[in-house]
Image (cartoon, helix red, strand yellow):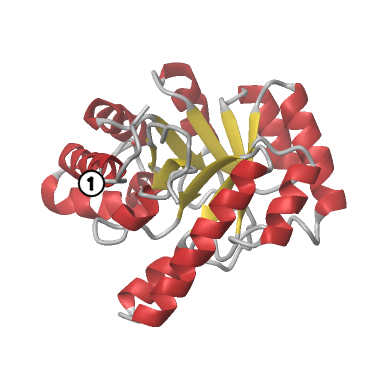
Amino acid sequence: MTPNFEVPYLRLGVNIDHVATIRNARGGRHPDPLRAAHLAVEAGADGITAHLREDRRHISDNDIARLKAELTRPLNLEMAATDEMLSIALRHLPYACCLVPERREERTTEGGLDVAGGRQHLERFVAALKDSGIRVSLFIEPEEKQIEAAAAIGADVIELHTGAYCERALEEDAKGLALEMERLRNAARIAAEAGLEVHAGHGLTYNTVSPVARIPQIVELNIGHFLIGEAIFGGLHSAVRRMRALMDEARASVTGRKIA
């Protein structure tokens, strides 16, 4: 059945972490993540995401300060729920903070945050960020218990982990892909009904973005590693523009729904 609401514009947040990864491989200032952020905005990004990790493997404290000072679009700071990261967020006051799990040994964020199991720990961080006017997002698996816990501790937003869906696509596992897609659809619906804003991201590519973009409750996709990789071959502006176009085409194709 067609929902009786308008499908909202789908925002694109571009994660510029791996521009910093390349810079840090040699040291110095090049390539500059801030320059990448400006190029992404020019190409159609609605916001910029940066993950300040505990070990500073890519984005640095100085990057966060420069991004906050110079960006013309909202800055979303991805961070672990630690006192150090909370102090940095409260000092710089980004538009939003997305709390993510973090382990030193992982190459990238693996899996969603266990909000249901870590509710007591997370409540303090959510409250402190919101008290300072920062929107709070929680990066979670598309599971009802995690969504319910996110709503219970006062999060404004959830970001659904699309990693399993993208892995099934790479494996050409049609049955698994359908199951993961259904999990994402159900989670987005449940979250929206609970009053949460719904975002999604992790592993999305040109080939996998459209089905996710067609989920009407999702209002933002955050994409990084793939776009930076594509930028090596054709430039960041071109990569972001193509992703923006695919998202818009997918949104417009949702039959019977008007793009607001």
Lateral position of residue 104 relative to residue 148, left or right: left
Lateral position of residue 63 relative to residue 104, left or right: left
Q: Residue at x 47, y 69 (%)?
A: 180
Please determine whether, in this image, residue 127 is positioned above or below residue 115: above
Percent coordinates x, y for residue 35 in the rendering: 29, 30
Near-viewer residue (227 or 33): 227
Q: Residue at x 49, y 52 (%)?
A: 57
Instruction: Note whether residue 54 is visible.
Output: no
Quadrant (top left/top right/bottom left/bottom right) for the C terminus: top left
Query: Outermost residue, left direction?
Result: 234
Percent coordinates x, y for residue 243 in the rendering: 25, 45
Which residue bears the numbered disc 1? 246
Percent coordinates x, y for residue 67 in the rendering: 45, 26
Percent coordinates x, y for residue 39 in the rendering: 25, 30
Instruction: Note whether residue 152 is visible.
Output: yes
Please determine whether, in this image, residue 175 is positioned above or below residue 76: below
How dense is the environment of label 1, judged by Cα within 10 Å: few (below 14), some, or many (20 and up)? some
Please determine whether, in this image, residue 55 is positioned above or below residue 155: below
